[in-house]
Amino acid sequence: MIGRITTQMTAQNLLANINQSLDRISTTQQELSTGKRINQPSDDPYGTSLALQLNGQLSDLTSYSNNITDGTGWAQTSDSALSDMTNAVQRIRELVVQAANGTQSQTDMSADASEVNQLIDQIKQDANSQYNGQYVFSGSATSTQPYQAGSNDAYAGNTGSVTRTIGPGTSISVNADVSSVLGTGQTTAGQPAGDGKLLNTLRNIVNDMQSGNSTALSGNDLSQLDTNLNSLTGLSASVGATVDRLQMASSRIQALQASDTQVLSNTQDADMAQTEINFSTQQAALTAALQAGAHIVQQSLMDFLSG
Amino acid sequence: MTIPSYSGLQTALSGLEAAQAAIDTTGQNIANANTPGYSRQSVNMTERDPLTIQSLSNVTGAGSQLGLGVDITSIGRIRDQFLDVQYRGQNTQTSGDNTASTLLGQVQAALAEPGSSGLSSSLTQFWQSWNALGNTPTGQGGAGALQAVIGAGQTVATSLNTLGNELTTLQSQITDQYNTLTDPNSGPIANDANQIASLNTQIAQAQVNGLNPNTLLDQRDQLIDDLSQYSNVNVTTQPNGMVNVSFGNAAKAAAGGTTDAAPLVNGGTVDLTDNLTDANLSGSGGTVGALLGLYDSTTSTGQVAGYLTTLNNITSSLVTTVNNAIASADSSGATAPPFFDPTGTTATTIAVNPALSTATAPYTAAEAQAAGGLSGGAADSAYNAFVTQIGSNVRSTQNAQQTAQSLLTAISNQRQSVSGVSLDEEMTNLITYQQAYQASARVMNAINETLNTLINQVGAGI
C-alpha cells in the first residue's frame, strides 16, 4: 500500500506502537495493583452501574442484619422476662392450691400472702426489663418505665408497637403487649380494679389469703389464675415465634449477602490469573518492540557503504 | 558546419553542474530528514536543446542532432495536496476528540467512582446511619446515633458540594481555554493566520520573480496543519500562489461548495472578527469546537452544563425526598425539623439543617426508619444513572479518540511516504550523483586529452 518507507515513518510507527504497549501495560498494572477490573466508570459503564447497585444492596442487607440483631435481642429479652414471669405465676398457683384446700393455718396463709406479694414485685420487675437502655414492655414509649414498684399497678406504657425493618418493605413487630396479660391492676391498694388480668387476680389472691377465704381461692381465684397463666403462655409463645422469624430472616439475609458479594466480586474484581498472563504477554510484546526498534532505527544503507 | 571543438567541454560541465546540484539537494534532504513539515526536494532536469549539424549526415543531407548536455529546470518539493486535505481533516477530528476525552476524563475523575470516597458510598452510609437511629430512638443512646446521622448527612452534602464546585470550575477552565485560543491579539489561531497571510505575500512575490519558494511553501503548509487542530480548515489556492483559508463552520460550508465570503486568511489579509465568533465555531470540529460542545459560556449550554443540571436535579430530589419522608412519618403532629436545609437544593448549596441539635432529639423512630427506607430509592438510582452516563460518554469519546488517532497516524504515514526523507534513498542518490559527477569529470578529462593531442601533437612538426 505504501510505496516508500521513510526513516521518520519507521521511527514514528515504532514510537506509536511502544506507546500503545505501555498504555496497555499501565492499565493492566492498575488492575493488578487495585485487584479491580473497574477502576473508573469508563472501564465498564454497565458494570459500574451494577457495582454501585450491588454496593447499595449490600449496605441495605447490612442494615437489615443490624435490625435483626437488634430485634432478636429485644425479643429474647422479652422471652426470658416472660418465662421468668411464668415461673413466678406457677409458684403462686402452687401456693393458691395449698391454701385452697382449707387445711392451712391463718399464719401459714399470711406467710403465703407475703410470698405472693414478693412474687408480684418480681413479675412487675420482669415487666420493667430493659434492652439496650429501653423498656421492652412499654409499647412504643420505650423510655417510660411500664410499672411502678409497690402497690400501684397502673400501666404507664402504651399499646404501640416497636418495629424493625428486616427486608425490603418487610417490618416485624418485636415487642409484646404485656399489659394485655398483666392488666392495669388496681390503681389504689385495696380497690378492686376488676379487669380480670393477672395483677388484678394476684391482688385478689393476696386479699383472700390474708382474710383466709379458701373458698374464693379454690373457686374464682384459681380459675382466674389459670386463665391468666394461659394468656401469659400464649404471649410467651408469640414472642418465641418472633425470635424464630427473625432467625429465619437472618439466615436468608446471610445467603443474600454471600450471593451479592459473589456477584459484586465477579463484576468489579480482576481475574488475577488472567490479568497476570495478560501482563506477561504485554511485557513480552513491549520488549520485542523495543528490541526490534533498536535494530530498525540503527540500521541504514550507510552501515553497509564503505568509504 | 562541423562539431564545435569545445562543445564537449560544455556538455561535460553541464553534467558536472547537474550532478553537483543533485548532490547538494541530497545533502539538503539528509539535513532536513527530521525537520517537521519538510518536504523532500528533487532536482528536475531536462536534456538541453540539441545542435543540428548538417555535415554529420552526408547521406540524407538533413544532418544530425548533437546533444549539448543537461539543464536544471527547477528544484521542486514532492508533495501530494490531496493527502494534505485528508491530513488536516483528520487532525481537526483528532484534536477535537483529544480535548473532549481529556476534559470528560476530569469529570469522571471528580466522581471518584466506584470507590469508598465517592458520593455513592457516602449515600449508603447516610441511609445506614438513619437505620441505626431508627433502632435507638429518642432517649438513651439516641444522641450518638443522631450525631452519626448528622455526620453522614454532612459527608453527603460535602461530596455534592465538591462535585458541583469541580464541575463549575471545569466550566470556567473550558471558557478560559476557549478565550485563550480565540484571543484576537496573541491567540494561537490569530498567530497562525497572521503568519500564513505574511507567507502568502512573500510567496506571491517570489513567484513573480520566477522563483520556487520551497521553504516558504513548507512553512505555510505546516502552519495550516497547525491551524487545523483548532477547527475545520478549507484551503483554496489562488493563481498567484496565495491561499485562502476558511475556518470553522465556514470551512465546512466551503468544503461543501459554498463560497466563503469572509475567509480567515484572504491572500495577504486576515479577518478575525468574522471568523472567531461563537456562531462560526459552535458545532465545528477541532479543539475550539470541542470546547464549545463541552461548555459554551455565551449560552451556558454544553455537555458539562448538562451534567451540572443533572447533578442539581439529583440534589434537589434528595433534599425533598428526605425532608418529605420525615414529615410524612411524623404522626405525633409535632413538626419534626427538615434534615436538609430546604433552601439549598443545588449541588453547591446543599447543607444539613444548621438548627439540628443532638440535645433536642428531633426525630422519632418511625421518622428515622422512613428516612432510612429511602435507601436504594430515587436518589441512589438517579446518581447511579448519572455515573453510568458519564462513564459511557467518556468511554465512547476515548474510543473515538483512539480511532481518530490511528487514522491520523495512517494518513501521516501516507504523507510521509510521499514527502518524507528516506535516508536509504538519499544515500543511493548520493552514490548515483557522485558517480555521475566522476564520470562527467572523466569525460572532461578525455576531451582535454583529445584537444591536447590536436593542439600540441598535430602542429609539433612545423
Image (spheres, rainbow, N blue to C red):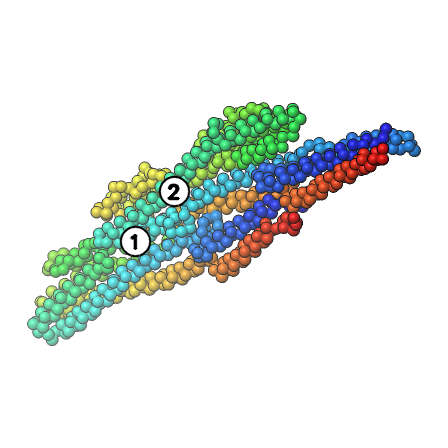
How far across and how far down the image is residue A197, in percent?
20, 61
How far across and how far down the image is residue B105, in percent?
46, 44
- State the residue position of label 1: B132
Q: Is residue B8 left or right of residue B344?
A: right
Q: Is residue A28 left or right of residue B353?
A: right
Q: Nearer the viewer, residue A301 or A244?
A: A301
Q: Nearer the viewer, residue A140 or A303?
A: A303
- State the residue position of label 2: B163
Q: Residue at x 36, y 48 (%)?
A: B123
Q: Residue at x 81, y 32 (%)?
A: B5
Cα gap from disc 2 to disc 1, whole angstroms: 27 Å
How far across and how far down the image is residue B279, in percent?
51, 28
Q: Nearer the viewer, residue A59 or B83?
A: B83
Q: Residue at x 83, y 32 (%)?
A: B3
Q: What is the three-letter code of the residue carrying label 2?
A: Leu
Secondary structure of the residue carrying numbered label 1: helix
Farthest residue to the left: give it: A107
Farthest residue to the front: give it: B462
Q: Nearer the viewer, residue B119 or B7?
A: B7
Farthest residue to the right: give it: B59
Query: Which subunit holds the residue at mark 2?
Result: B
Q: Residue at x 27, y 60 (%)?
A: A74
Query: Which subunit holds the residue at mark 1?
Result: B
Secondary structure of the residue carrying numbered label 2: helix
